[in-house]
Amino acid sequence: MRMARPLHALPKAHLHLHFTGSMRHSTLIELAREQGLHLPDALEQDWPPKLRATDERGWFRFQRLYDIARSVLTKPEHVYRLVRETAEDEAAAGSGWLEIQVDPSGYAQRFGGLTATLELMLDAVEQAARHAGVGIATIVAANRTRHPLDANTLARLATQYTHKGVVGFGLSNDERRGQAREFERAFRIAKRGGLLAVPHGGELMGPRSVAQCVDDLGADRLGHGVRAAEDEWLMQRLAERQICCEVCPTSNVGLGVAESSELVPVRRLFEAGVPIALGADDPLLFGTRLLGQYELAREVYGFGDEEVAELARQSVRSSAAPESVRKELLKGVDDWLAASPE
Ligand SMILES: [Zn+2]
């Protein structure tokens, strides 16, 4: 048998993980029981659910499960617990830097408004990072299905918290609804405020949607972006400008974006020189965390240790981590490669 280095020991950065979606499944079950909330089968005995978001009904079902998961987080202590456990799981996966995506609007009513909710989340992040010894930054994400004016408000709010670890501004939810261009102003506010532009694109829609994220929103990275692989010229542009695709293979299969993991074009993007940061997106709904994505790289996409190490480097280089953290993580990657396989 060919020897291989342990993937959990490979230092890496995790750039695509949503707040609610990062909850441990066991925690969801526990909190639901505690509060006498009934969970649908898809979140209990039939977990992880098989979803099909390629049509609007499937996407609606995905969002509904997401909303149910969100409903168990009713107290600030739940928020602290979720982020603490997420940070522990990141540390166990060798992730030295996490950028977690939050949309405070989904919780604003419960936690006293947008600002109070964001502050609660940022405090939870700071504590969790210290507890687990993982660097964690926050990306504030707007919702594509809501009015662009809401996105402007969020962008303004996000820029006020750069000193508290907010590093980016995202755009999530159904890519088929709401043109990227409608959110141009929100992204301009965010970029002017020093935030990275990290919209979702090229997941449910093809290369055109990716190009719009780049041209209209000034994307520094793309949430997913996998469908850029359908367009040679677009991949070339992403490679030249070193615009990273946050590729989440398990999520792509879970949502039916790809029929099977073999069909997620990780290899194609990699060969084209497009920087990749593997991500778990919503482990709560897809059943696998960050390490599972690196295992797929090795086992399904045939990445050898040198190549897996390069994926890890790309995730670090595409992150907003401070120079000292980058240096340390990149050195850790070299050390990982230098050690002999077990
Ligand atoms: Zn996502």
Image: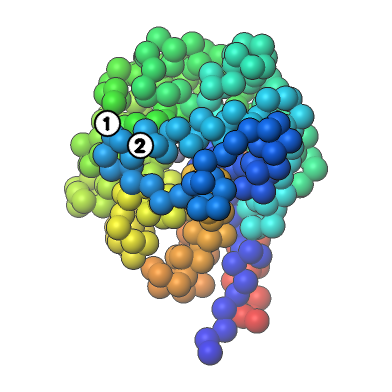
Q: Residue at x 72, y 49 (%)?
A: 88
Q: Secondary structure at mark 1?
A: loop
Q: Quadrant of the C terminus?
A: bottom right
Q: Position of residue 313 (x, y in %)?
A: 52, 56
The label on residue 59 is: 2
Q: Residue at x 49, y 17 (%)?
A: 155
- The residue where tag 1 is placed is 176
Mark 2 and mark 1 in contact? Answer it, CB < 8 Å. yes
Q: Is residue 168 above or below residue 119?
A: below
Q: Nearer the viewer, mark 2 or mark 1?
A: 2
Amino acid at circle 2? Trp
Q: Position of residue 217 (x, y in %)?
A: 34, 26
Q: Is residue 6 above or below residue 12?
A: below
Badge 2 local density, few (<14 within 10 Å), some, or many (20+)? some
Q: Position of residue 210 (x, y in %)?
A: 28, 38
Q: Position of residue 94 (x, y in %)?
A: 65, 57
The label on residue 161 is: none
Amino acid at circle 1? Arg
Q: Secondary structure at mark 2?
A: helix
